[in-house]
Image (spheres, rainbow, N blue to C red):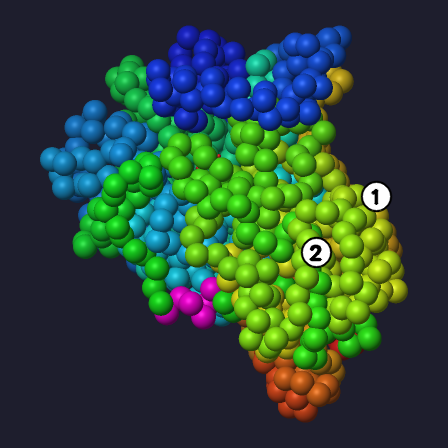
């Protein structure tokens, strides 16, 4: 067993290139964006700073003198912890790093990679483990080895479509996909995105995101992932990984793991990154669950996260990388850092990291050569890093007929460049359906929707229209980071670690949202805003139209058949949100509702957005959470409003009445004795979102899984069948060999459930039938999602849905035995249309 002392390699004393970033020279910014250290970069930095200053960033101005820009911490450390040694041993040491197993279909690729690596020189091997600059807009670029015919690799953002280039689509974002609850559609989106990345020669798609999961309601990046629920996220990440990789593009499932807040995500000054302190059971049952699905689906790459887990950096954490990912989950691919997330040399190599990004290298590169030569890092470890990278490249056939890395992705789109149109006409319907199905209708009274031949409509709110510019200027521009509807200088502040300590401005006031901001933003090309589509429709129907996008208290024509208020809730990488509601938009809704008796509210929300300030107003007749629909936004909303399509989305999160109803609202900050080492204690365990509301008996405004259609469904005929009893199948512990995703028998189907869903309304529709399970162990949640099926059911028709429960679905993580354990007892099975509307109940004994 590895000794306690070994974990200290995470923080070797200064001098060997492995010291904590905060103590090492240079800032994380220049490491993440090395060009900023160049002359041109310095000029850009100065300009950015001037823009921020002239932008009057309130938070920056408010920072106290000497403030760190990292939560505005100014307290002096009294009896504070000043040495990282205080935390040694909190994350168990797991060494050595396992070599790539090469099981099943990976055996061939491993063999090919081994002979490839055998021909490489030490310098060539070292070179391939770090990013290099390129003349493309790929945020990461693995250098070529021309001598051996390896052309290098482009790593491109992100999980919602290819960022920072032209001739690609803006796909619905993760939260929108989560709200669709549609596996088949998710698969089509994955294959459409994969095709586009491939055409542009992007070898690795930097996504999908299943971390953050969404523990912190106001976290800036929750919208990039599918859902706070691990089962829902797990199913959708699995579809995405499979589909993207079927197009020959490797997925980099991220950010592994516990990356639940933006505040303190990077070290700053002498403050280290926040530590997500997660117990083993919570880690497995909640945060690891969807990552496990991604590994099982064959994700060829994993991105380790910025922050620390149990006080050891995500990319230097041997328990997570060597222990969980590469041993327990049998991961075959390679691990890449998040950009600039490497803070140690020897330590990261030994902990299981395989590639650092974006380069040029600070801890590895020539240092890694030295480490190999002086024996600090065994050459076998370097060989394994490179083998994993090259084997994955072979595994996805990228050695054959893969487009040149980053082709048609110039650094500056405003310069003449080669046109590579990656869009495929066959994706059009998926973009539309994707946009459509992530809209969730939660209120609809007095038959407000669908509209019936309106004579006059009034449109209000900043989120109805496109921003005034769609200008793809090079460098760190608004277009590149999806901030043209927002305040770009504020975004840049957050991105470079000087976020307003109070959180980011709640709305994007200059226009509608197709995605959130940061590296998960989509490239906006031909985007259709709600206003664009409404005008078109109204013109064809000769409907009279009025609008006002800017006035918070606009004049309202009271004879309007309906008044739309379009608002949004913005969220971006680099900053957490200020709040879950905003008074400006709520005031606008109330103002309009006081003057128009059919006020329909549509919110493009990049995260949870509370509505209790207006939802009970009698003139607010309908509310749609429009999330982040991608380029077909306007077409989709108009189709829904007019009833050409039916709403079928359901909330992938719980909407509370009050902020205080959530177990964790905002991020943790450096404080008290932990001023230099901010701590985030995940003491609520698995009790987040509906698990918390159920346990504490809190009535939400709209529960997890809720969403209305234009029709209603009845549930009947629940049947729960245990698989034929054979001793090993129902044994308490799994005994299968480890393959990608973990022990193979975790995926055995032990129980099959069926139910009938009948459409008892007048219109056709689609329903998301949901199965929740109560596991008979004390301390487990009242219920947990363990199955869902989206089915189209025409008026008066009935369909049967089927759910298959695997061993893992029925198990709990046993911290002593370090395995998934199948408890004995009576399980409760509930089926229905949301987490609080479960008319069918049965039990099964195991
Ligand atoms: C983000 C990653 C992203 C990378 C490359 C980082 O700031 O956290 O999600 O893939 O940059 O742009």
The yes-or-no answer for disc 1 within 8 Å of ligand 1 is no
Left or right of 98: which side holds 177?
A: right
Q: Which image quarter: residue 824?
A: bottom right
Q: Please state the horizontal and vertical placement of residue 355, each as a whole percent of the image.
A: 36, 33
Q: Looking at the image, is mark 1 or mark 2 nearer the viewer?
A: 2
Residue tagged 2: 460
Classified by dominant secondary structure, the portion drawn in magenta counts as helix
Percent of width and height locating residue 317: 51, 31
Give the residue furthest to the bottom: 796
Residue under numbered circle 1:
660
Q: Does residue 581 appear in this view?
A: no
Q: Residue at x 78, y 63 (%)?
A: 557
Residue 16 - label: none
Residue 372 drawn in magenta: no
In the displayed structure, does residue 20 sit left or right of residue 372? right
Of the pair 840 and 789, the residue shown nearer to us? 789
Q: Secondary structure at mark 2?
A: strand
Q: Is residue 23 left or right of residue 117?
A: right
The residues colored magenta run: 426-431
Residue at left offset 47%, top offset 21%: 47
**Which of the image's four quarters has the C terminus?**
bottom right
Q: Are marks 1 and 2 in contact (CB under 8 Å)?
A: no
Measured Cα–Cα span from mark 1 to mark 2:
30 Å
């Amino acid at each position: 067993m590895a000794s306690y002392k070994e974990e200290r390699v995470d923080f070797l004393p200064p001098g060997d290139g492995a010291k904590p970033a905060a103590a090492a020279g240079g800032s994380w910014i220049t490491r993440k964006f090395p060009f900023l250290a160049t002359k041109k970069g310095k000029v850009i930095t100065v300009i950015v700073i001037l823009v921020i200053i002239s932008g009057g960033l309130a938070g920056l101005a408010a920072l106290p003198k000497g403030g760190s820009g990292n939560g505005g911490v100014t307290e002096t450390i009294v009896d504070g912890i000043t040495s990282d040694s205080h935390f040694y041993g909190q994350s168990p040491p797991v060494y050595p790093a396992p070599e790539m197993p090469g099981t099943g279909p990976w055996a061939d690729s491993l063999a090919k990679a081994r002979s490839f690596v055998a021909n490489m020189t030490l310098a060539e091997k070292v070179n391939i483990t770090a990013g290099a600059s390129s003349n493309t807009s790929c945020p990461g670029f693995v250098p070529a080895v021309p001598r051996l015919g390896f052309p290098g690799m482009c790593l491109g953002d992100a999980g919602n479509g290819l960022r920072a280039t032209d001739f690609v689509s803006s796909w619905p974002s993760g939260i929108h996909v989560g709200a669709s609850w549609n596996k088949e559609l998710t698969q089509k989106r994955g294959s459409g995105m994969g095709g586009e990345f491939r055409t542009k020669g992007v070898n690795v798609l930097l996504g999908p995101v299943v971390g953050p999961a969404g523990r912190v309601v106001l976290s800036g990046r929750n919208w990039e992932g599918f859902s706070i629920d691990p089962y829902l996220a797990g199913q959708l990440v699995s579809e995405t990984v499979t589909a993207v990789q079927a197009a020959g593009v490797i997925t980099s499932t991220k950010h592994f793991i516990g990356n639940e807040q933006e505040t303190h995500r990077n070290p700053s000054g002498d403050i280290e990154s926040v530590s997500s302190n997660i117990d083993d059971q919570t880690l497995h049952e909640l945060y690891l669950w969807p990552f496990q699905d991604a590994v099982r689906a064959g994700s060829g790459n994993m991105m380790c996260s910025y922050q620390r887990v149990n006080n050891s950096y995500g990319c230097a954490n041997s328990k997570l990388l060597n222990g969980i990912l590469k041993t327990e989950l049998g991961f075959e691919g390679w691990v890449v850092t998040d950009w600039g997330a490497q803070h140690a040399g020897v330590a990261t190599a030994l902990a299981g990291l395989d590639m650092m990004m974006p380069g040029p290298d600070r801890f590895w590169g020539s240092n890694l050569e030295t480490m190999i030569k002086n024996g600090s890092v065994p050459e076998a470890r370097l060989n394994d890093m490179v083998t994993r990278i090259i084997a994955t490249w072979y595994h996805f056939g990228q050695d054959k007929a893969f487009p040149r890395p980053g082709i048609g992705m110039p650094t500056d789109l405003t310069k003449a460049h080669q046109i590579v149109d990656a869009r495929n006409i066959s994706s059009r319907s998926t973009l539309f359906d994707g946009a459509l199905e992530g809209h969730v209708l939660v209120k609809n009274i007095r038959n407000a929707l669908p509209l019936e031949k309106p004579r006059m409509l009034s449109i209000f709110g900043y989120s109805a229209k496109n921003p005034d510019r769609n200008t793809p200027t090079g460098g760190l521009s608004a277009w590149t980071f999806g901030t043209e509807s927002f305040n770009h200088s504020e975004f840049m502040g957050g991105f470079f670690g000087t976020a307003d300590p109070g959180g980011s401005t709640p709305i994007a006031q200059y226009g509608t949202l197709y995605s959130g901001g940061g590296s998960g933003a989509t490239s906006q090309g031909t985007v259709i805003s709600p206003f664009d589509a409404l005008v078109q429709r109204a013109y064809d129907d000769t409907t009279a139209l009025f609008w006002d996008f800017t006035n918070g208290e606009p004049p309202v024509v009271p004879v309007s058949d309906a008044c739309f208020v379009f608002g949004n809730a913005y969220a971006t990488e680099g900053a957490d949100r200020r709040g879950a509601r905003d008074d400006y938009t709520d005031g606008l809704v109330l103002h309009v509702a006081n003057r128009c008796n059919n006020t329909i509210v549509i919110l493009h929300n990049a995260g949870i957005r509370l509505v209790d300030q207006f939802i009970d107003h009698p003139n607010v007749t309908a509310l749609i959470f429009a999330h982040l629909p991608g380029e077909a936004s306007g077409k989709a909303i108009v189709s829904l409003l007019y009833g050409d399509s039916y709403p079928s989305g359901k909330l992938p999160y719980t909407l509370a009445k009050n902020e205080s109803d959530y177990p964790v609202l905002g991020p943790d900050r450096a404080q008290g004795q932990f001023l230099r080492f901010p701590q985030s204690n995940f003491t609520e365990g698995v009790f987040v979102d509906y698990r918390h509301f159920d346990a504490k008996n809190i009535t939400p405004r709209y529960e997890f899984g809720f969403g209305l259609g234009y029709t209603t469904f009845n549930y009947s005929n629940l049947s729960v069948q245990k698989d034929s009893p054979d001793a090993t199948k129902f044994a308490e512990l799994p005994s299968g060999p480890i393959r990608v995703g973990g022990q193979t028998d975790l995926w055995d189907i032990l129980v099959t459930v069926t139910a009938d869903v009948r459409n008892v309304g007048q219109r056709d529709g689609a329903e998301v039938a949901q199965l929740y399970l109560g596991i008979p162990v004390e301390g487990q949640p009242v219920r947990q999602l363990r199955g869902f099926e989206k089915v189209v059911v025409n008026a008066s028709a009935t369909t049967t849905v089927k759910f298959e429960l695997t061993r893992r679905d029925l198990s709990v993580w046993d911290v002593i035995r370090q395995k998934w354990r199948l408890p004995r007892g009576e399980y409760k099975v509930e089926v229905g249309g949301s987490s609080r509307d479960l008319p069918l109940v049965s039990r099964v004994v195991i």
